[in-house]
Image: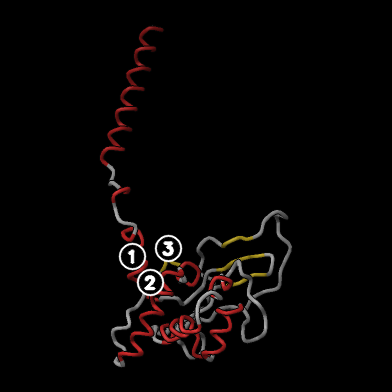
Amino acid sequence: MKRFLTWAFFIVLILAVAGFCAFLYFIPPFFIAPPETFSKAQNDAAPTVADIKDPAQRAIAEHGRYLVVTAGCIGCHQVPGPKGPQFDKYLAGGLKFLTHDGTYVARNLTPDKETGLARRTDDEVKRVMRSGVFPDGHVTSYRMMPWGSYTNWTEEDRHAVVVYLRHLPAVRRRIPDPEAPSPFRDPTAHEEVYGGKDYATGK
């Protein structure tokens, strides 16, 4: 009986190894796929600028689109849904973050007149990218918005981003204001993200 169990164990082990090797053999060859393949859906989600009639303005907006996509703005300013970001509401915000500087919900970057960037001047938007200073005077945490990286952009880059954001489809989504810091449950923690839940009111 003991000998039988020993043989059975080795047979099961061999079958498991063979099955695992077959799995590795038949999975898609990720290592030969171009990197763009894995980010294509996210990159394609950014609205195009083809409807801008003025060629000069369209070229500026196209550069802004490139910067928005490569900077990964959709990573924070997405509208979270049950199956991932809702790309039809591009950059309308709603993700909530808790940091040592306070609680933030990613802003609505679409040009909605009441809840988006239409309420802000170009200079106000550029100042946020340049120094993290919002119109009300508070400085957003660099953990929430990597404005330290955007300070390396040229003024032309920041202008291009603003031009592109102004041409996004407007989405009405009211974002809660930042909240003052509160004690962490874990004193060693620096940042928590609230699991993809949508915290915008949509009103």
Distance in Å between CA atoms under marks 2 and 3: 12 Å
Which disc number belongs to residue 41? 1
Screen quadrant of the N terminus: top left
Disc 3 is placed on an element classified as loop
Type of amino acid at the residue the image marks with label 2: Phe
In the image, which is nearer the foreground, mark 3 or mark 1? 1
Residue at 67%, 70% in the rendered image: 102
Q: Position of residue 38 (x, y in %)?
A: 34, 58
93 over 39 or under it: above or below = below
Residue at 49%, 82% in the rendered image: 158
Q: Where is residue 161 in the image (x, y as percent from the top left)?
A: 45, 81
Residue at 34%, 90% in the rendered image: 56
Q: Name the residue under label 3.
A: 82
The answer to which of marks 2 and 3 sits earlier in the sequence is 3
Q: Do the residues labelled 2 and 1 touch (CB within 8 Å)?
A: yes
Distance in Å between CA atoms under marks 3 and 1: 17 Å
Type of amino acid at the residue the image marks with label 1: Ala
The answer to which of marks 3 and 1 sits earlier in the sequence is 1
Q: Position of residue 3 (x, y in %)?
A: 38, 7
In the image, which is nearer the foreground, mark 2 or mark 3? 2
Count residues near mark 3 (Cα–Cα under 10 Å), then give few for <14, some for 14-19, many for 20+.
few
Which of the pair 154/28 is nearer the observer?
154
Disc 2 is placed on an element classified as helix
Q: Name the residue under label 2.
A: 87
Residue at 51%, 85% in the rendered image: 115
Task: Name the quadrant containing residue 120.
Answer: bottom right
Type of amino acid at the residue the image marks with label 3: Pro
Q: Where is residue 12 in the image (x, y as percent from the top left)?
A: 34, 22
121 over 146 or under it: above or below = below
Count of labels shown?
A: 3
Task: Name the quadrant containing residue 63.
Answer: bottom left
